[in-house]
């Protein structure tokens, strides 16, 4: 039987790292509840095994490196001491290049005009035992060139997203001469720089967001010209970029409900049914994290363009559980736009056993998606709700990934409008087909999905129960208080300081429709959330209280945008179960 404990305690892999010879894979393993992370190793010697505690495994030609307690380690122990947390590193032939703040402790009082502490690029020389600072700017991404003679670096002018992250810059540092060459402004949210070589010409590629909101793309910068070129087809949605030993880099691409592997500039080389969300490769062998409809995430490996083999099994405890059947959906929006999604039925049930109570779970982002992967997590997930007897609808409305840039960018300044109609069209279809009982509809979502939940109950009274987790009720307030304020202002359409209102975001904020809400709402939020601050939940709670709407308001102390503590994840899973059981 599926229990809340099985959900939060099962192991999940991430951060695969392939050894230079392609024979060994190191990867990070932790529980859904984000317990102490571990480094596991898979090779030809048998079952994968834990080799250390830590994160961010990386190989050099002679060793495996990783981070533990903010310091660079090998299996033999720490390599050197640094007085602040190391946030990124690259092992190279004669040095370790790493990113960290200055060792000087931060003052207890933060003064904005004096700035935040930048994370600078530094180098550790193991022979001399010396640490030097290479770049004084705030560094957000670094990649070592395959010949170990240079690094590509992404920097911000300040550690703050606004303005630093709005105009990141790319540069190349020659490690032999110390010369730094500026390659100009990169696109918004630039990350994951990688090197590649085309004949005698070196290139740096990186992943970034187009036009600050909407789809992602891979930009390529030949060092000869310094020109930033978008090499991503309009229809492709890259999600991860991987540097290889030779040739153009590889990228994971969200492709509808599935995942493809592309080589930059050449197109698709592999296609996998399900959700792959991490990759490592030497150019010939690929290691990915892949989950399918009824198989949880595991490491899979094989030749580029060939069949993959699962490496071990991180969740053997699931072997005897009967899961709800997972069905792919394809339908048309009100305006003819092609949409997709998933339907999960209670275990052992078919459509003919309907109609069922139906719970819709809009995804976060909005630039996210539901792929045909394993739908089980501490967060409101389909298999958990299906195990309680509900049918679950997982829609992919416009604004998400997997359907090209235009699809993703269409919600900028229009959140909740056509996006909500896409959700409602899918619900209407499932009601018409006899799957959903129109008198027993629920909705639950977190982050942007929490916004959609709050929006939905202000647009219709058809839902009999709702759960809003870390959700948004006022876009103007979020633009001024959330850590991604500039991005949120683009989604909501305004900030509130443009002048006398009403403002664009007023029309798009659920709080504006609070007087129309009749649906009982369970509000849950982390007390220390900086992405969507607790004030959003408090505002919505006070409005519902004012209008006498049945609701409950749960605050989790010490939690941010994602719940990390085991007891809090268990509490949310159980509250969710009881809430929908009572009201549906």
Image: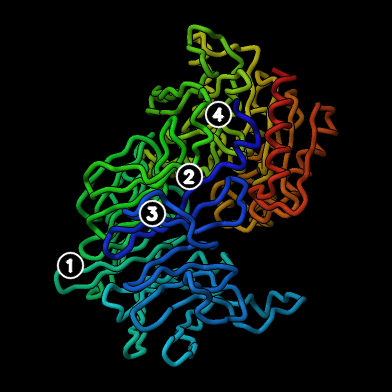
**Disc 1 to disc 4: CB gap under 8 Å:** no
| Label 2 environment density (alpha carbons within 10 Å; few <14, some 14–19, many ≥20) | some
**Disc 3 to disc 2: CB gap under 8 Å:** no
Q: From the viewer's side, name the closer residue of 13 and 446.
A: 13
Q: Which residue is mark 2?
A: 367
| Label 1 environment density (alpha carbons within 10 Å; few <14, some 14–19, many ≥20) | few
Mark 3 vs mark 2: give the one in front.
3
> Which mark is first along the chain, 1 or 3?
3
Mark 3 vs mark 1: give the one in front.
3
Disc 4 secondary structure class: helix
Q: From the viewer's side, name the closer residue of 575 and 77.
A: 77
| Label 3 environment density (alpha carbons within 10 Å; few <14, some 14–19, many ≥20) | many
Q: Which residue is mark 4?
A: 382
* Residue 511 appears in the figure: no
> Which mark is first along the chain, 2 or 3?
3
Q: Residue at x 70, y 20 (%)?
A: 464
User: How far apart are the two marked residues, 3 and 1, measured between alpha carbons?
Assistant: 32 Å
> Which mark is first along the chain, 1 or 2?
1
Q: Residue furthest bottom?
A: 128
User: How far apart are the two marked residues, 2 and 1, measured between alpha carbons?
Assistant: 32 Å
User: How far apart are the two marked residues, 3 and 2, measured between alpha carbons?
Assistant: 33 Å
Q: Which residue is mark 1?
A: 198
* Residue 366 appears in the figure: yes
> Which mark is first along the chain, 2 or 4?
2
Q: Position of residue 88 (x, y in %)?
A: 49, 70
User: How far apart are the two marked residues, 1 and 4, measured between alpha carbons?
Assistant: 45 Å
């Amino acid at each position: 039987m599926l229990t809340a404990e099985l959900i939060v305690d099962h192991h999940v892999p991430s951060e695969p790292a392939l050894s230079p010879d392609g024979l060994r894979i190191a990867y990070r393993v932790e529980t859904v509840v984000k317990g102490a992370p571990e480094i596991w190793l898979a090779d030809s010697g048998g079952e994968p095994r834990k080799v250390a505690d830590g994160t961010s495994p990386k190989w050099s030609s002679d060793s495996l490196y990783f981070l533990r307690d903010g310091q660079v380690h090998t299996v033999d122990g720490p390599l050197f001491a640094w007085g602040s947390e190391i946030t990124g590193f690259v092992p190279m032939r004669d040095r370790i290049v790493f990113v960290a703040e200055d060792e000087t402790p931060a003052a207890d009082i933060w003064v904005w005009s004096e700035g935040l502490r930048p994370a600078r690029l530094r180098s550790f020389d193991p022979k001399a035992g010396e640490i030097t600072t290479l770049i004084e700017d705030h560094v957000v991404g670094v990649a070592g060139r395959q010949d170990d003679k240079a690094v590509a670096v992404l920097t911000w002018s300040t550690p703050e997203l606004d303005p630093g992250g709005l105009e990141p810059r790319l540069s190349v540092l020659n490690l032999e001469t110390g010369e730094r060459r500026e390659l100009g402004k990169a696109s918004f949210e630039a990350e994951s720089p990688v090197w590649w070589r085309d004949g005698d010409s070196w290139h740096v590629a990186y992943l970034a967001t187009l036009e600050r909101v909407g789809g992602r793309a891979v930009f390529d910068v030949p060092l000869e010209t310094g020109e930033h070129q978008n090499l991503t087809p309009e229809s492709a949605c890259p999600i991860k970029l991987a540097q290889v030993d030779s040739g153009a880099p590889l990228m994971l691409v969200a492709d509808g409900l599935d995942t493809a592997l592309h080589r930059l500039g050449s197109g698709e080389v592999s296609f996998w049914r399900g959700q792959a969300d991490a990759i490592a490769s030497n150019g010939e062998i690929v290691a990915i994290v892949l989950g399918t409809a009824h198989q949880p995430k595991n490491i899979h490996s094989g030749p580029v363009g060939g069949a993959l083999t699962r490496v071990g099994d991180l969740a053997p405890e699931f072997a005897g559980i009967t899961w709800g059947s997972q069905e792919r959906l394809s339908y048309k929006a009100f305006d003819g736009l092609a949409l997709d999604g998933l339907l999960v039925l209670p275990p052992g049930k078919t459509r003919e056993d309907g109609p069922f109570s139906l719970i819709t779970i809009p995804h976060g982002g909005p630039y996210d998606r539901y792929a045909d992967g394993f739908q089980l997590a501490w967060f409101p997930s389909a298999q958990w709700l299906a195990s309680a007897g509900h049918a679950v609808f997982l829609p992919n409305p416009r604004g998400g990934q997997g359907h090209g840039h235009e699809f993703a960018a269409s919600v900028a300044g229009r959140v909740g409008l056509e996006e909500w109609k896409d959700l409602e069209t899918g619900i209407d279809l499932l009601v018409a087909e006899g799957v959903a009982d129109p008198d027993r509809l629920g909705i639950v979502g977190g982050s942007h999905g929490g916004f959609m939940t709050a929006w939905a109950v202000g647009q219709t009274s058809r839902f009999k129960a709702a759960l809003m987790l870390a959700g948004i009720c006022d876009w103007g307030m979020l633009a001024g208080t959330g850590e991604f304020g500039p991005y949120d202002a683009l989604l909501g359409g305004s900030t509130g300081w443009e002048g006398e209102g009403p403002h664009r975001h007023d029309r798009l904020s659920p709080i504006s429709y609070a007087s129309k809400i009749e649906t009982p709402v369970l509000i849950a939020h982390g007390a220390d959330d900086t992405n969507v601050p607790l004030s959003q939940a408090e505002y919505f709670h006070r409005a519902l209280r004012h209008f006498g709407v049945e609701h409950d308001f749960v605050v989790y102390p010490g939690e941010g945008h994602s719940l990390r503590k085991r007891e809090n994840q268990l509490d949310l899973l159980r509250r969710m179960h009881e809430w929908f059981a009572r009201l549906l």
